[in-house]
Image (cartoon, helix red, strand yellow):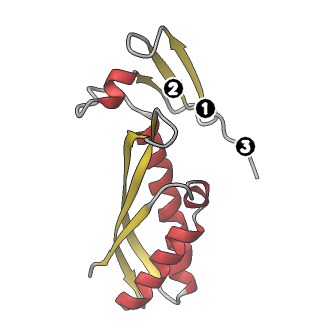
Amino acid sequence: MPTRTARTAWDGGLQDGSGQVELSSSKVGTFDVSFPRRAADDAGGYTSPEELVAAAHSACFAMQLSANVAEEGGTPVSLEVTADVSLGPDSAAGGFKLTGITLTVKGEVEGLDDSGFQRAAEAAKAGCPISKALTGVDITLKASLVS
């Protein structure tokens, strides 16, 4: 299996500095990062490690869920996955930590009822490699089957 690479160039201190995250393997883009924008409600055109984790998690979960739906005997038609990743203070170790992830999926599948879809979604939550990497974070799942 391949190794994927991203690179960050950072200038300055935490509060006054900024950087650029480059998706090196795919070469699809370079994105600005800064701590004040990371901690703000409005990102203002900047990304953050949490948004990048959310992107990775939603994509990984969608792929895993499509496989699990097929394993349950269904056919995935469309899956819409949102991952909300929260950052907060780490009272135990100091600094910050990921305080939770909510995966929300709306799926249109053929050949599965709601209980089959829920089983597939729970299995995807447990089996997705990004979920496995984030075992120290509370991950909540909201899955709904749409027709």
Q: Quarter of the image holding residue 45?
A: top left
Element class at badge 1: loop
- Residue type marked 1: Ala
Q: Determine the CA span between mark 3 and mark 1.
A: 10 Å
Confirm or deny contact between disc 1 and disc 2 (CB under 8 A). yes
Residue at x 52% of width, y 90% of height:
73
Using a 10 Å C-alpha cutoff, classify the residue at mark 1 as few (fewer than 14 neighbours), some (14 to 19) or many (20 or more): few
Q: Determine the CA span between mark 1 and mark 2.
A: 7 Å
Q: Nearer the viewer, residue 141 or 106?
A: 141
Q: Quarter of the image holding residue 90?
A: top left
Give the mark, 3 or 2, whose residue is nearer the N terminus: 3
Give the residue pinned by disc 3.
3
**Which residue, as the protein is rendered here, is positioned at the far left?**
42
Left or right, 15 with respect to 67, comes to left
Element class at badge 3: loop
Indicate the quadrant containing the C terminus: top left, top right, bottom left or bottom right.
bottom left
Residue 6, label in figure: 1
- Residue type marked 3: Thr
Q: Nearer the viewer, residue 53 or 27?
A: 53
